[in-house]
Amino acid sequence: MKNPKPVMETVTDMDFFDLVNERLDYVKSRHVPGHYDHCRYMARRWVQRWGNLKCSQITQKMIEKFLEERKEAHFGGTANREIRYLRATFNHGGKRLKENPTDGVKFFAESRKAKYTPSSDDLDKIIAIADPETQDYLWTIRDTVGRMSEINRLTWPDVDFAKKCVTLYTRKRENGNLEPRLVPMTENLFEILSRRFDTRDRAIPWVFWHTYTSSKTREKMTGPYIDRKKFMKTLCKRAGVPYFRFHRIRHSGASIMDECKVPTATIQKMLGHKKRETTEIYLHPIIESDRAAIAAFERAREVKPHTKPHTNEKKVTAQ
């Protein structure tokens, strides 16, 4: 009789500290700097609280208490973001964990305000008061309806002057791989990129770049931008327009194309969306069917007799 094979015991627990670091390494490997920074920022808070515990020792009640504190200190949206990132971290443990303590945690109610989408006039005002370098950057985002990260990683090999198009790369996919998208150039963008190409530093591949001091080595380095959000508040204030971020320029471009009767499928392709539903979120103008509905409502109200205003006079009855 043969000896039975030893049964391997399934591991259903691990140190929370190790899980967090493993998840951070995974996010970092996908080269999405902004997402990684958000994860690391929150991870420090989690480790400070539960860093010496096993994953199985962290309960739903403990997480809910932590989230209530976050909500009280800030607001529901902040707590909800913590839920999403915590859930993703425990999900990363997969079958190595017996259960995910965030599964039963409910999201908090949020009061969301409509974000401002700039008009063409407001974009003109912003660009007019910016310095020449920033003007080129804003025009490139505006004319490609690209994401900030896509413009930041744009290199000269991605610019095809012969065919008058640029190739933008994005990582907004589940596997994190870079995926290309071909965008035709406007005449304005062609002139801007041609001028920059003629005056470029041949040793630097990026269309937009800067010199900065490394936080690790303290040495001067040259490279592409990662985040350029700070100057928008100043520009909006100086131009006297409501504050908006780079991403709203994409919304503005999509809305303008929609108003010009560009098919939604074409707008979807320009924006680099996989799903039509995502593109439809970007289309902000009031459509004609909305206006027709309001007009019908108004006409229906007009044909009805107006109700006499209520008076405080007492009705006199015969005695």
Image (cartoon, rainbow, N blue to C red):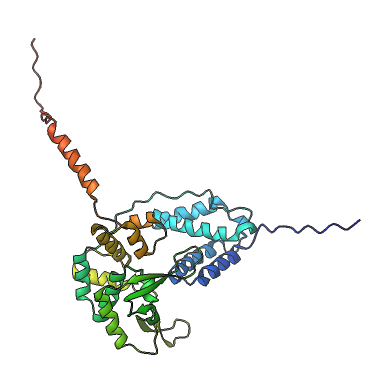
Q: Residue at x 63, y 57 (%)?
A: 95
Residue 2 location in percent, x, y? 89, 58
Outermost residue to the right: 1
Position of residue 254 in the picture relative to residue 52 (left or right): left
Position of residue 112 in the picture relative to residue 71 (left or right): left
Say which quadrant the C terminus sits in.
top left
Residue 301 location in percent, x, y? 16, 35
Outermost residue to the top: 319
Nearest the camera: 304 or 236?
A: 304
**For residue 98, above or below residue 186:** above
Say which quadrant the N terminus sits in.
bottom right
Question: Taking the image as drawn, is residue 116 in sight?
Answer: no
**For residue 56, above or below residue 226:** above
Position of residue 113 in the picture relative to residue 12 (left or right): left
Q: Residue at x 30, y 88 (%)?
A: 198
Question: Taking the image as drawn, is residue 32 in sight?
Answer: yes
Nearest the camera: 178 or 114?
A: 178
Residue 72 location in percent, x, y? 41, 54
How many numbered marks, from 0 up? 0
Residue 106 location in percent, x, y? 47, 48
